[in-house]
Amino acid sequence: PSEEKRISMFPMDYEEFRWALGDTSTIPLLKKLWEEKKSFGDDLNRQLIKDFRLYMLIGGMPQAVKTYIETNNFRKVDEVKRDILNLYEDDFLKIDSTGRAKILFNAIPSQLEKNASRYQVSSVLENTRAENILELISEMESSKTVLIAYNSNDPNTGLSKTKNLEKFKMFVCDTGLFTTMIFKDKDFTDNIIYEKLLFDKLESNLGYLYENVVAQELLAHGFDELYYYNSKKMGELDFILEYDGNVFPVEVKSGKDYSRHRALNNILTCPEYDIPQAVVLCNNNFEVKDNVIYVPIYMMMFLQKEREIDMQFHLDLNGL
């Protein structure tokens, strides 16, 4: 016991997913492009976005990845993920025999689709407010099946000091599982759903799918707690990160109109907060406009504490 060390385990992140596919060249390429901080060929960017969407569809659960490698069949991958989700539901009943945890979990897609400022517990569990189930939410978070981003509206005083336990957003631990949950009530037919998602042909606005994968990657790369910002005056930011006492806003854009971000502009121009820079994760090429850095979403793995790159972005802007 004196030599025992606990470590947190996560689904395979994007880098590990590429390794599993036998690809050892993509990540070094992305790291080089990141370090250069300049745009590159649009054809290459489109291919890299497509590769990343494959990860979003399959996810990082080892059995799902293994099935994809062996069969190259999205239907079989989906069946594996549905089995995992069924096991999760069984485990939720062990956490809470009333079934509330299971209901809260299954409502994650519909809650995120509403684009509300928080998870609306009362709309999922009748006559129940978030303040009444804080312990249950904590147990679900501890189970590592869900990811929680807490609301924090005062970046100046430290995010952990101002987080509101009653205002939160809930994500699924693995985006591949989340993709299956979105269409869980529909019969999987001839891989159509997966193919449309892969080639960006699905009509639905899947911005919340992008938010889920960002939450998953951030947690896997050193950000132990996730936060988001929302106020009537400023608007809402998808994520706000904290590193060495500094605040770093992150917006997630899944559509073509990635340059519109009113809340982000409000925060950056607020003298009270004095935030020098922000990142927008999107499908577009690498670009810098004023104090906003537009980063292809497949590069978000480099927003991590260990490499000390994220908060030093502004130090390199003069060289662009």
Image (cartoon, grey):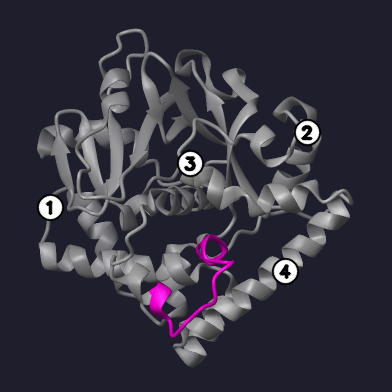
The first of marks 1 and 3 along the sequence is 1
Residue 52, x across and y down, in percent: 35, 65
Horizontal side, residue 172 vs residue 105: left or right: left
Q: Which residue is drawn at 29% across and 19% down?
A: 266
Q: Please identify the quadrant where the C terminus is shown.
A: top left
Residue 121, x across and y down, in percent: 67, 35
Q: Residue at x 30, y 12 (%)?
A: 270
Q: How far apart are marks 2 and 1 (CA)?
A: 47 Å
Crowding at mark 1 (Cα within 10 Å: few <14, some 14-19, many 20+)? some
Residue topped by disc 4: 86
Residue 141, x across and y down, in percent: 70, 45
Q: How far apart are marks 1 and 3 (CA)?
A: 34 Å
Residue topped by disc 2: 133
Marking on residue 39: 1
Amino acid tagged 4: Asn
Secondary structure under the numbered disc 3 in the rendered image: loop
